[in-house]
């Protein structure tokens, strides 16, 4: 290009020299205004010349940097480096940053620089040498655009023409081609569009957020974009009073020059607060977002990953989602999930830009939606798959309680059975059970079995609210029995297979079930229980028995609400008689929803299930999550380290108890390579040794996720899926769950870090103890908090540490002794595999401390020497006065140490002894 002697490029470069000449601030404004006016006249070639000049001639002066560094080094040796440090920072800044700041003296100079950066980014792909300039502009704009000055305005029909035209032009997520389309997004009562302005850009909006008020989270984009004209896509405008969800279906940056300048969390928070203020009943805030980089990523990965190469060949020529059903669909969704939640860039952030935005702004990846967008652009991006990201709503104030998150998302299901049926109906061939003999059972198979069992139970006279007591071996049919009971609106009552006849007498007498189901081999032992009021049925581990005599399937499903009973689960009864905890459909559904969200458990997961299903962990956590997510499970009758290691290759999640991990660590096959396909290891039901947590991470590269729950509440807390998993803690409260620590004597809430009784409130907390109103009343505070009986502390970051059971507290000479504090020290001693500390009667102190130690294999322990080695870390009253070495600690079926048994064993140790 031939330049005029006084053309815009020459004028601009001259103005830049004037801006850097050291003139006063008053003189800068007119020069800056001339510079930006000249810049506005440049064509693309002249812009490239100007940008290149900024990179090459307004960079860092290396001589000045060397000189400043030498002076800083000399001053550092003398202890007078503060002033030289400031000088060093000044000289390492490129001169163009000062030039750009001086251009900002022009009226609306910031907006001019935003547009300049948009031009830089347009040229950047072909001219990467301009990257330093883009970095400088991004740095300056990020510091200038204080998000606290953002102003949100709702866009309406009467909004300024410039704003409406801007929205029409910059809507790139779901482009509009006419004013009629724009009207459809701003006029209806169930639609909102918000524009964000900043003083630095005047009347030019920075960002638009488009919102649809809906009932339930949307799974397709067409109804959100369609006209409410009675067509198939959208039948009518929804009365905002009937909406429970705000779907943020389009978020657009309206100024290209602000790409990468962060406003997300602040602007989304404003939208949430505005809608919550206007419509308090709207409790859920989700997106329906594109996945723009997936197809390119899949094509790229196909050259490196055999399974993805096979998937790519299956999908690359497909024209529409219908061509991708069958086996391709779950494989493709699994790949999408991997792309969104596993694949990260060099900075450790998601490679997908939309995921990076939402996950970086506090959202959680919630649900993938198949065939959600039929546009050709969406097909080229992600084969039409879209995702709901979920944002927290506005929390109601909480008093003296620690809360994390808000009420859990409805997840489009109100009962476990309803969610299971939805999967079984939509995809009956999907595998639910992978069995030990290599066979599988599908969702459709399981639904058919459940309906046959429901038919038999109905024939036995089971009605809504009746109890069905079950003491059978673990099998897919046993899970179907659980589902059949829910189908009828009856109450499932699982019983430990180890319970004896006298124990069963108590449960049957207390619960008065309509049907009792046992194994065929135990039928004679229970025959005497049969009566007009109780029918005896049988079910074996291989699926045989009278329960499946019915050939017809019952399709009728009882209508249940969240407050209706789903199950009675009896507590272990270590003190006093066992209590029946009444769990409602709402308890089970809300807890399941929270865990699915927290642990990112989806239909792409394959769980290794080696837990019993008469316990809350195996049935109401592991099985419920799988049934609701549409996932699958390797269904093992019991824990076997070799069998579990064999399944790591194809599975993604293991849920277990601490003994699982102790035994896995004892197996040489446990390596990082063996666990390469796994994404999550969960431990609960008993404390996990910190040494096992550390050893497992070192061996496999996986940090075990510890969580905390109990029969009466389901799960209450969990270490984070993404974040610091702290050994020795059970993590943070689950969304919707409130936890607090109170003084065991006064009931007053304690400050962070102090030990007291742990109390919980939330939709997961049970309805009370079966036929024990006085006991129920005694266990709840007036404000609805349930007293767990666990002693705990909550640190300043919100992490909960369980110290022990209240009944395990030792009061020695009037001082409180927490066994866990001593056990942690003992477990760390050489040669000690594990320990248990209990209090036993003492004639002088009331109680005193006894330590029970288990040696590591091949080790001999000197108990007195071990206690002496930790005495420096314990006050005298906490130090064990007796030590016993045993081969193993007594445990229940879930691995919990039976301290009541230990107290009974050593109760006479100090009889007749004085201090």
Image (cartoon, grey):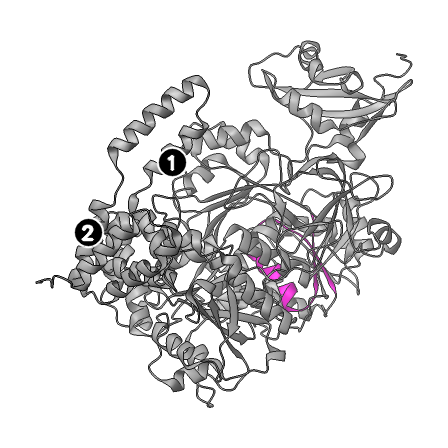
Q: Position of residue 882 (x, y in %)?
A: 77, 15
Foreground residue among 722 and 346:
346
**Disc 1 secondary structure class:** helix
> Do tag 1 and tag 2 residues touch (Cβ < 8 Å)?
no
- In the image, is 809 to the left or to the right of 561? right
Q: Is residue 452 visible?
A: no
- Residue plotted at (38% across, 75% down): 166
Q: Earlier in the sequence, mark 1 or mark 2?
A: 2
Please state, as top left, top right, bottom left or bottom right, where the N terminus lies in the image: bottom left
Q: Is residue 234 above or below residue 274?
A: below
Q: Which residues are magenta?
A: 466-495
776 or 79, which lies in front? Answer: 79
Instruction: Name the image quarter holding the C terminus.
Output: top right
Please give the label number shown on residue 89: 1
Q: Position of residue 456 (x, y in %)?
A: 64, 67
- Report whether 664 appears left or right of 304: right
Classify 10 Å Cα crowding around label 2: few (below 14), some (14-19), many (20 and above): some
**What label does residue 52 carry, if any?**
2
């Amino acid at each position: 290009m031939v330049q005029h002697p006084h053309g815009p490029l020459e004028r601009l470069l001259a103005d830049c020299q004037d801006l850097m000449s050291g003139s006063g601030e008053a003189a800068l404004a007119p020069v800056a205004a001339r510079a930006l006016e000249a810049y506005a006249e440049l064509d693309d070639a002249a812009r490239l010349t100007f940008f290149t000049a900024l990179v090459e001639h307004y960079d860092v002066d290396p001589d000045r940097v060397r000189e400043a560094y030498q002076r800083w080094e000399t001053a550092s040796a003398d202890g007078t480096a503060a002033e030289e440090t400031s000088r060093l920072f000044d000289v390492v800044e490129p001169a163009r940053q000062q030039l750009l700041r001086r251009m900002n003296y022009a009226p609306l100079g910031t907006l001019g620089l935003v547009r300049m950066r948009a031009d830089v980014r347009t040229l950047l792909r072909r001219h990467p040498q301009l990257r330093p300039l883009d970095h400088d502009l991004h740095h300056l704009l990020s510091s200038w655009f204080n998000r606290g000055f953002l102003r949100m305005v709702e866009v309406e029909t009467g909004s300024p023409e410039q704003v409406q035209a801007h929205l029409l032009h910059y809507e790139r997520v779901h482009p509009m081609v006419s004013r009629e389309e724009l009207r459809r997004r701003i006029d209806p009562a169930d639609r909102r569009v918000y524009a964000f302005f900043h003083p630095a850009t005047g009347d030019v909006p920075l960002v638009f957020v488009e919102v649809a008020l809906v009932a339930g989270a949307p799974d397709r984009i067409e109804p959100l974009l369609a006209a409410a004209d009675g067509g198939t896509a959208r039948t009518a405008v929804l009365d905002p009073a009937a909406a429970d969800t705000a779907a943020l279906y389009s978020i657009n940056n309206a100024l290209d020059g602000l790409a990468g300048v962060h406003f997300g969390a602040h602007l989304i928070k404003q939208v949430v607060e505005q809608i919550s203020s206007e419509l308090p009943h709207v409790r859920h805030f989700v997106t329906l977002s594109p996945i723009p980089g997936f197809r390119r990523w899949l094509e790229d990965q196909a050259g490196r990953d055999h399974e993805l190469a096979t998937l790519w060949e299956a999908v690359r020529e497909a024209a529409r989602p219908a061509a991708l059903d069958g086996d391709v669909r779950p494989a493709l969704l699994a790949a999408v999930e991997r792309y969104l939640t596993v694949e990260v860039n060099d900075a450790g952030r998601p490679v997908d830009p939309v995921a990076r935005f939402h996950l970086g702004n506090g959202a959680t990846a919630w649900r993938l939606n198949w065939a959600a967008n039929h546009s050709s652009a969406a097909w080229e991006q992600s084969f039409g798959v879209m995702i709901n990201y979920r944002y927290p709503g506005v929390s109601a104030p909480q008093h003296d309680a620690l809360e994390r998150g808000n009420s859990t998302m409805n997840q489009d299901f109100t009962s476990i059975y309803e969610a299971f049926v939805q999967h079984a109906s939509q995809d009956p061939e999907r595998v639910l059970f992978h069995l030990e003999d290599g066979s599988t059972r599908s969702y459709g198979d399981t639904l058919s079995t459940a309906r046959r069992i429901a038919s038999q139970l109905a024939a036995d006279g089971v009605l809504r609210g009746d109890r069905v007591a079950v003491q059978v071996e673990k099998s897919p049919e046993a899970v179907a029995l659980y589902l059949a009971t829910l189908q009828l609106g009856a109450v499932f009552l699982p019983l430990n297979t180890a319970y004896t006849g006298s124990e069963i007498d108590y449960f049957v007498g207390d619960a008065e079930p309509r049907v009792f189901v046992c194994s065929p081999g135990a039928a004679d032992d229970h025959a005497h229980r049969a009566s007009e009021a109780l029918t005896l049925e049988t079910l074996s581990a291989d699926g045989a028995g009278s329960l499946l005599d019915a050939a017809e399937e019952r399709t009728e499903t009882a209508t249940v609400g969240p407050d209706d009973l789903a199950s009675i689960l009896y507590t272990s009864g270590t003190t006093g008689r066992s209590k029946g905890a009444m769990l409602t459909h709402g308890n089970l559904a809300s807890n399941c929803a929270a865990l699915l969200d927290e642990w990112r458990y989806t239909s792409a997961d394959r769980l290794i299930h080696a837990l019993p299903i008469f316990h809350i962990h195996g049935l109401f956590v592991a099985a419920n999550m799988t049934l609701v997510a549409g996932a699958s499970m390797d269904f093992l009758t019991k824990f076997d380290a070799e069998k579990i290691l064999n399944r790591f290759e194809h599975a993604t999640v293991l849920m277990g108890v601490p003994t699982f991990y102790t035994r896995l660590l004892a197996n040489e096959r446990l390596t990082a390579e063996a666990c390469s396909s796994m994404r999550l290891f969960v431990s609960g039901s008993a404390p996990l040794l910190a040494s096992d947590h550390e050893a497992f991470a070192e061996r496999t590269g996986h940090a075990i996720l510890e969580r905390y729950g109990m029969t009466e509440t389901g799960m209450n807390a969990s270490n984070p899926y993404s974040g610091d998993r702290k050994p020795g803690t059970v993590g943070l409260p689950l969304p919707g769950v409130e936890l607090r620590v109170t003084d065991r004597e006064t009931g007053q809430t304690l400050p962070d870090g102090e030990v007291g009784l742990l109390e919980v409130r939330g939709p997961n907390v049970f309805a009370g103890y079966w036929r024990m109103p006085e006991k129920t009343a005694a266990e709840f505070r007036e404000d609805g908090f349930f007293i767990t009986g666990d002693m705990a502390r909550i640190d300043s970051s919100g992490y909960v540490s369980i110290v022990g059971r209240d009944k395990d507290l030792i009061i020695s000479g009037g001082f409180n002794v927490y066994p866990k504090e001593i056990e942690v020290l003992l477990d760390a001693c050489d040669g000690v595999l594990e320990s248990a500390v209990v209090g036993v009667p003492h004639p002088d102190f009331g109680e005193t401390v006894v330590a029970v130690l288990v040696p590591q294999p091949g080790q001999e322990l000197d108990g007195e020497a071990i206690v002496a080695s930790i005495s420096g870390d314990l006050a005298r009253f906490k130090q064990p006065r007796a030590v016993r070495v045993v081969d193993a600690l007594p445990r229940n079926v879930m691995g919990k140490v039976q301290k009541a048994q230990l107290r009974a064993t050593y109760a006479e140790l100090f009889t007749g002894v004085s201090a």
